[in-house]
Structures are given as structure tokens and as C-alpha cells.
Image (cartoon, rainbow, N blue to C red):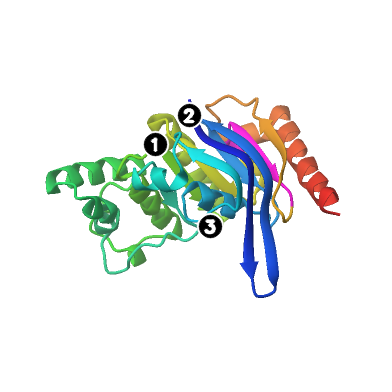
Amino acid sequence: MTVVKADDLALTFQTNDGPVHALADVNLTVEKGDFVSFIGPSGCGKTTFLRCIAGLETPTGGSLTVNGMTPDEARRSRAYGYVFQAAGLYPWRTIAGNVRLPLEIMGYSRAEMAERIARVLELVELSGFEKKYPWQLSGGMQQRASIARALAFDADILLMDEPFGALDEIVRDHLNEQLLKLWARTEKTICFVTHSIPEAVYLSTRIVVMSPRPGRITDVIESPLPRERPLDIRDSTQFLEVAHRVREGLRAGHAYDQ
């Protein structure tokens, strides 16, 4: 089943200094259960494309559907959860209170909210931290709470914009492992923006390589790696070959821009 479909997608921002071409000729299909990573240099349109999927930006050319609907219709039908670069937790709310927020807005009953909060906090291994406040948690734990909030209303799609970019390498490795386990347990479709080649290769079923502005897709790499991936798979020949292809795709994108 096709979840996201982009055909000749383009987006141009009008600014006081003239038009900024953020995306051009983007063609991509994301299937149900895929883990798709978007990688490219800063300003290549990775986050912009994610925001288009979420209905937070409006393309100026081509077409884009999410679950067969317009992105705006998909947003109103609660088709996705969004995890931003910063955890974005309200400091005056407990962890449970932060996870509860979208459920309150959507009008869930108190009993169902409690059940959902307990379930998603267990999924991200934060059971027992319900009454803590964000400032009492490490950066990695805050991001796990942010993921729990995005999962709370059980959307089929998880949009993740560099959620681990600000974390140190050890914490990032641990959260990468946890995210793969979470993906296996929930069978969500995940669209994931990253600047890290090892992270993109380790996590993904497909890696979308993008060029500098205007953002174009220079390569789509189907991962040959098994779905169950210990961290040491990063030392394997297969992993290094995929990483090399991603790196070459990024170089080709820069050459394309010139």
C-alpha cells in the first residue's frame, strides 16, 4: 500500500530578495511499513519535504498524496505523528502530561488517555517516569518522551526531523537501536531526516539522497541489510558498501548543482 506519493513536486518560496526554489522535480513513493531516511546537505529541502507531507508547507507544483489524500486532509484525519529536532516538551507539564496533550485536544476519555500513555511510555522505555518533569530527564530521555507523544494517538506514519542530531554519539547509537525495535513492534511507516550517513544506513529500508537547493533526489537506495540489525552490522562489508554509495550520491548532487 502506498502511503506517500510525490509526482514532480516543487516548492518555491517568495521572499523580499526574490524566489527561493526549495524543491524541484521530486518523485518518490513510500510504501506502508517502510523506514525511509532523507539525507543531504543543509538547505537541500529534507525538512521542507517532510513539512509538505505533514501539510505544514504547500507545494507550488506537482502533486503529493498521503494515504491517498491531500496532506491537509491527512493531517485532519490524524494520519501522522511528528517528532521535531528539539523535544519541544512543556516544562510545566510532567512527562505523562506532555504525552497526554494531543489526546486531550482530540477528546479521548480519561481512561483511554491513561491506557495510551502507559502503553507508549513502555514502548520508549520510560515507564516509571510519568511524574517527572522534562528538566529532570536527560536529552535522550526527553526525545524518547517526544516520540511517545507522537505515538500516543496511534497514527500510521511517524515523521521525524533529525530527532537525535543534538545528542552525543553514545546516546544516539542507543536511541537508534531503540527506534529500530520500536519500528519492528509498531510496524509504523517512518520518514526520517538526518545528516548522518551511518544513521541513515543503519536505520533505513530505503535511503533518499538529495542534492543542494533546489532539492532534488539524486539517488534512492534499497537497503540489502536484514531488518534485525545489531550495531556491529556497521562494520560489515554490506553496510560499508551502502554508506559508500550514499557518499557518492551526495558528491554527485554537489556536482549536479555546479
Residue 40 image point, x, y percent: 69, 50
Q: Tell me if 199 is positioned left or right of 75 in this view.
A: right
Residue behind mark 1: 156
Kind of element beneath mark 3: loop
Q: Amino acid at mark 1?
A: Asp
**Which residue does the image show at 44% across and 52% down from the upper left?**
83
66 relative position to 242: left or right: left
Q: Secondary structure at mark 1?
A: loop
Q: Residue at x 47, y 40 (%)?
A: 179
Task: Characterize the local packing of mark 3: few (<14), some (14-19) or many (20 or more) Cα atoms within 10 angstroms.
Answer: some
Vertical position of residue 94 compared to residue 194: above or below: below
Say few, some or many: other residues with alpha carbon within 10 Å of mark 1 (under 14 / 14 to 19 / 20 or more).
some
Q: Nearer the viewer, residue 143 or 251?
A: 251
**Residue found at x 39% / y 53%:** 146
Q: Tally the numbered discs.
A: 3
* x, y percent for residue 23: 66, 52
User: Which region of the structure is painted magenta?
Assistant: 201-211
Which residue lies under the disc numbered 2?
32
